[in-house]
Amino acid sequence: MPFLTGLRKKIYLTFAGLSLFFGLALVLFVTFEYSQELRSELEKRGISIARHLAQQSIAPILTRDPLTIKLNAIQAQATEEDIVYIFFRDPRNGEVFAHTFSNGFPSALLDVNPLPPHEDHSITHLATEQGKIYDVAVPVGRGGLGQVHVGISAQPVNSAVQRLTRDIALASLLLAGLSLLLSLPLSAALVRPLGQFTYAVRELTAGRFGQRIAEDGQDEIGELARSFNAMSEKLRDAQQELLERNRLLAEEVDRRRQAEGKLASQLKFLATLMNELPEPVFYKNTEGIYLGCNRAFEEFYGIPRDRIVGHRVDEIFPEEEARVHLEADGDLFTNPGTCQYELPVMAAGLRPRQAIYKKTTYQDNSGHIGGLVGVMIDVTHEREIDQMRREFVSTTAHEFQTPLAAILGFCELLQLPEGEMSGNREECLGIIHERAEFLSRLVDQFLDVSRIEAGRDLPLNLGACQVDQLVHAVLRNQRGNRQRFEVRFPENCPAVLADEDRISQVIENLVSNAVKYSPPEGRISLSGTVEKRMLRIAVADEGIGLSEELREKIFDKFFRVDSRETAPSGTGLGLYITRAIVEAHGGHISACSHCGQGTTFTFTLPLLEGTGDPELPEVEFAI
């Protein structure tokens, strides 16, 4: 062959002095060692090409773009002359994504080189009509996306090795008789380039691409050096391209990781925000299944979140309550927007509550209705206040009507001629004056409530005040009642710093309540003790008493223990104002009671500076 002429000339000139043994050894070396190196390099090149194709095919496989995969395979086959075929397959179902066979894909190739799990490559030698082919299999991605198979013909390498072996053997036989002297320069001429090739191959094997060999002469070694250098350049370029792609991929992964981190942070913030909202919040999908709720929703119903999420409302709540929710949800999904309704519900601990539900629909990414978000507002207290306000208006109208009717009646009576008038004129005027004072006290109560609600301080005229004397003054107005009053105060009771009119109002309110709810002939006791520079006054009765629930509400505005028409009269403001007066003086008021055992109201007032702690006297009775 023409391209072997230069090599033959060198063999004729330098191998004349080699012995037959050296020639045979060289033949064995070329046959086994060098050919093995070339085949190893061929396999490595096949692995490199397959990995490069696998990296290029990740994106097309994910997007199901077989045309791009096939074009990449055809381009790679056109670039490398010894590539016989390329195909991509899915090992799970045997599907072939793309191939480079022009006459159809031979199904026999599917089972010739199975890639074991967790292996990064697999090589099988195939004996075909076209000669020996190395089938190189490499996973795409981590193997979950498929495999790429590259078939590289071993014929060029085998042909080169066979030709070189044949020529060396023939030259060895012809030059066996030459002297040993001439074999020395021959050895140097051949070993030096082979050593360069060996070193360069090892460098390539270690991944240091771009190695070059001196391209001396126009013989076969020079041609091989040029081919090797071209291959090395291509491998280096492929490595650089792969590194650049890896860098871009790493940057993209980093950007996505940062975006996912920001999204996770926002979702965590929203979840924390919703969970910390004081009002119960929940959301469902279009099938009515709860997707989530906040802590307030769990605590309101006393149901853990895992028993709410993933369930429908009719699986959690009573039938009647669930029916109302299902009807409202159905109407809301039919007519998207917002809705609101009020419903009596049973909260944790079997507590009946009144709640308002506000719901609105939301859309998913496709713009369709994705579900609804709801907020529940507990309006039990507001409804109780409304009920007390209505009762207050009714009671106040009655409280005003009775004295007004008396005033109007006696005024009409006073307008009659003196001869037609029955009764004493002074007595009529006294009754009118008494009823007017009663109305004035009611108006004063309303004014006090207005000041308290506006956040203004009650007007106080502070000075030295003898509470024991005020108690006796109040009890003198109770002489017509049938109850028995018992008074116990310290001898020489110390004065307090207070407004006498306001404290008289407090004592009168407490005594009036004790009289209202005490049985006839019942005992009402008033006592005073000095504790820590405070005068402690207690008003105790033997009345109906209060439950724990009523004790918590006794000082609320408009609250009455008994709101029936037959109950004792009152506006529900007395104790509310009483507490405000006591606290305005720097004191404290409380109630202690049990059903059927009477009630004791206790309030404290600060002592006047310079007073001492007296001893208790004997009990004094005021009838």
Image (tube, grey):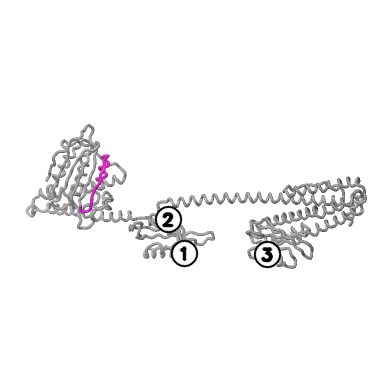
Above or below, 433 relative to 128: above
**Residues under labels 3 and 2: Cα distance?**
52 Å
Quadrant of the rendering where the N terminus is positioned: bottom right
Let me know if residue 597 appears in the view: yes
SS at badge 1: loop
The residue identified by callout 1 is: 287
Residue 169 figure quarter? bottom right
In the rendering, at what x and y percent does residue 174 appear? 92, 54
Q: Residue furthest front?
A: 21
Q: Is residue 403 magenta?
A: no
The residue identified by callout 2 is: 281
Circles 1 and 3: CB atoms closer than 8 Å: no
* Of callouts 3 and 2, the N-terminal one: 3
Closer to the eye: label 1 or 3: 3
Residue drawn at x 86%, y 57% is 166
The residue identified by callout 3 is: 96
In the rendering, at what x and y percent does residue 300 appear? 38, 55
SS at badge 3: strand
Q: Nearer the viewer, residue 418 or 70?
A: 70
Residue drawn at x 35%, y 59% is 346
Q: Is residue 583 magenta?
A: yes
In the rendering, at what x and y percent does residue 244 appear? 68, 49
In the rendering, at what x and y percent does residue 503 appear? 21, 42
**Residues under labels 1 and 3: Cα distance?**
41 Å
Q: Is residue 428 left or right of residue 21?
A: left
Kind of residue indicated by mark 2: Val
Q: Nearer the viewer, residue 496 or 78?
A: 78
* Of callouts 1 and 2, the N-terminal one: 2
Kind of residue indicated by mark 1: Glu
